[in-house]
Amino acid sequence: MFSTWHIVPTAVITAALTAITATGIAAWHRARSTSSHATAWSSCAIGDLFGVGIASWLAVPLWRLSANTPALNDDLIPGVSPADVLSAPLAYIAAEIYVRLRASGTPGQSGRLAVAPAVAALVALIVNVVTI
């Protein structure tokens, strides 16, 4: 069993790394397709950075707090519990919901954030395995 004070920092780390990584990858991809790096970074709005981060931030503590049982926290594989692994799909779903809601009504919006759910899932998995 993990305390709330252990789960919340894990969620904050997940949110920060997801936001930075997802927007960095989106900007890098945009920079490859355009000649101006300034255009690439400006296309990744600050709201997107926070939106993707907040989505993954919400998914991790909600899952970890609700799944904080001995059965889900037992490490079947050394260092990796079912609760760790299942945090990744929830982070993916939360980021995907954000991307889809953000893209509704804005043409081309989902394309630049398309990588965000996969990044959120990967980061959530790594952070949960390492920190918890």
Image: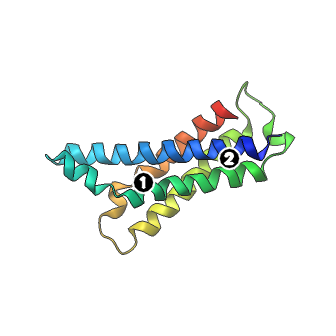
Helix, strand or loop at mark 1: helix
Q: For mark 1, does the 10 Å Cα neighbourhood hold few (<14), some (14 to 19), or many (20 or more) residues? A: many
Quarter of the image for the C terminus: give it: top right
Residue sitting at 68 percent across and 47 percent down?
8
Rendering coords of residue 117 (x, y %): 48, 51
Residue sitting at 20 percent across and 53 percent down?
39
Which amino acid type corresponds to the residue marked 1 in the rendered image? Leu
Q: For mark 2, does the 10 Å Cα neighbourhood hold few (<14), some (14 to 19), or many (20 or more) residues? A: some
Along the viewing direction, whichever of 19 and 88 lies nearer the viewer: 19
| Residue that carries the numbered disc 1 in the rendered image | 49
How was this image coloured? rainbow
| Residue that carries the numbered disc 2 in the rendered image | 8
Q: Image quarter for residue 130?
A: top right
Which amino acid type corresponds to the residue marked 2 in the rendered image? Val
Q: Which mark is residue 1?
A: none
Along the viewing direction, whichever of 36 and 88 lies nearer the viewer: 36
43 displayed left or right of 7? left
Rendering coords of residue 101 (x, y %): 46, 69
Cβ–Cβ under 8 Å for marks 2 and 1: no
